Each structure stands twice: as structure tokens, then as C-alpha cells.
Image: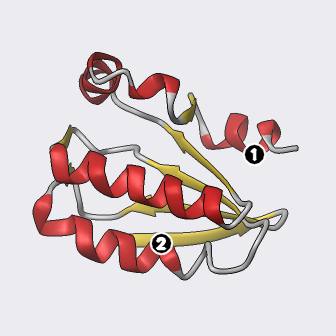
Amino acid sequence: MLKHELSNGIDILSFEGVNKLNILFTESLKENVSQYILKPNSKLILDLKGIEYVDSSGFGALLSILRETKNNDSQFKLCNITPEVMELVTLLQLHNVFDIRSSVEESINSFE
């Protein structure tokens, strides 16, 4: 499901064997991600490469993760969003809410 990498103190999570972020996966996503944002001032990148579909519960989970990171004085970025998912992100005006980058490398370089 989720693969973890650490680069320069930045937690990078990516999906394995999952192409939909829907209600079947969102609870475990929130649980898995929370362990990386428990400590204040953490930096997290969620790589959405391969995710072709996100439903309302998926967006809800992403917003929940964002809220948790902000409450913890942490930073959260999304990257590698497919054009189909980006269309929904834009339609829902979430591109103004999330810090979205085109790649993991760009995300890493954008941290302060």
C-alpha cells in the first residue's frame, strides 16, 4: 500500500499496488500517514503517482492530513498528480489549498 522513503529529513510516501484513493483505502491512509506527522515541524511529501481516481472520501482524507500537519507546525506537499485527478482538484478549488508540485524532486527542493 504505502511505501516510505526518507530524504534529507523529509518523509516521502508513495503508493504501491493502489490506483484509486477511495473509501476502501482512506482510513488506513490516515492511520499510516499520522505516524510521520506526529512530531512537530515534520516534512511530508505524498507522491500520488499512479493514482488515477480520487473520490470524496479520498479528498477528505487528504484534507484531514493537511489539517493535522498544520496543527503540528509541519509541512505537507502533494506531487505527481495525474491530469485526471488534477482536473478534479482544480474543479474543487483544492489547488489553492494544497501545496502541489510536479515531482518528488521539486517538492524536496521547495521545502524551507
Compared with 36, 111 (above or below) is above
At 53% from the left and 64% from the top, the residue drawn is: 68
Coloured how?
A: secondary structure
CA neighbours of label 1 inside 10 A, class few (<14), some (14 to 19), many (20+):
many
In the image, residue 93 lies at what x, y percent?
37, 21
Furthest residue toward front? 71
Displayed quadrant of residue 37: bottom right
In this figure, which residue is indicated by the disc labeled 1?
A: 108
Q: Secondary structure at mark 1?
A: helix
Judged left or right of residue 107, residue 64 is left
Q: Who's the residue at 46% across and 60% down the image?
A: 65
Residue at 62%, 69% in the rendered image? 5
- In the rendered structure, the answer to whether residue 2 lies left or right of residue 111 reads left
Tally of numbered discs: 2
* Residue type, mark 1 in image: Ile
Label annotation for residue 39? none
In the rendered image, which residue does mark 2 sit on? 33
**Which amino acid lies under the numbered mark 2 shown in the image of this protein?**
Val
Q: Position of residue 59 (x, y in %)?
A: 29, 46
> Closer to the N terminus: mark 2 or mark 1?
2
